[in-house]
Amino acid sequence: MARQEFPIEQQLRKDIQEAQRARDQVKIDTLRMALGAIHNLEVARTDRKHPQFGEALTEADCVRVLEQEVKKRNQAIPLYKQGGRLELAQKEQAELDILQAYLKSSQMSDEDIRAVVSRLIDEQGKEFRKVMPQAARELKGKAEGSRVQAIVKELTQ
């Protein structure tokens, strides 16, 4: 029995076709890599040793995979620049821009993050060490961790 594809996967496949028509090789490669990463997670869950063995893939899992790919690019770009490999840094930046377009719709705005953090500060007090873990747990998958951390720092000082 084949599982139902999630909207984000359908959009990736549709955009691959459009990129093929436009002969945009960077976009084709990036989107195929993203679909491959989602597929790899699904296959990994068939291994009995995997902590999430047997669990069905969810839309949140797909978004989390894309977030991990974005994070990899964010970490690689400064390293390539530091090593003087500007062509690789530009390639990673192009991939990053493509992937972030898919996360924008699932990410919360800074104002929404501030509202959640403000509520947590009212509940927990104005101490970073108490608020940050709560904010990270509540906003996981909805906002990038570095954005949450910056806003928590800003509001707790």
Image (cartoon, helix red, strand yellow):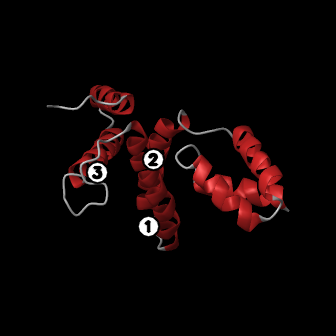
Q: Give me the residue at 48% from left, 57% from top.
A: 71
Circle 3 SS class: helix
- Residue type marked 2: Ala
Q: On the image, numbered disc 2 is attached to which residue?
A: 94
Q: Which mark is residue 85?
A: 1
Q: On the image, numbered disc 3 is attached to which residue?
A: 41
- Residue type marked 3: Leu
Q: Residue furthest bottom?
A: 83
Q: Residue furthest front?
A: 123
The quarter of the picture where residue 58 lies is: top left
Image location of residue 37, percent across then percent down: 30, 49
Quadrant location of the N terminus in the rendered image = top left
Q: Give me the residue at 49% from left, 63% from top.
A: 75
Near-viewer residue (23 or 15): 15
State whether residue 100 is above or below residue 6: below
* Label 1 vs 3, first from the N-terminus: 3
The 10 Å Cα crowd at callout 2, few under 14, some 14 to 19, many 20 or more, is some
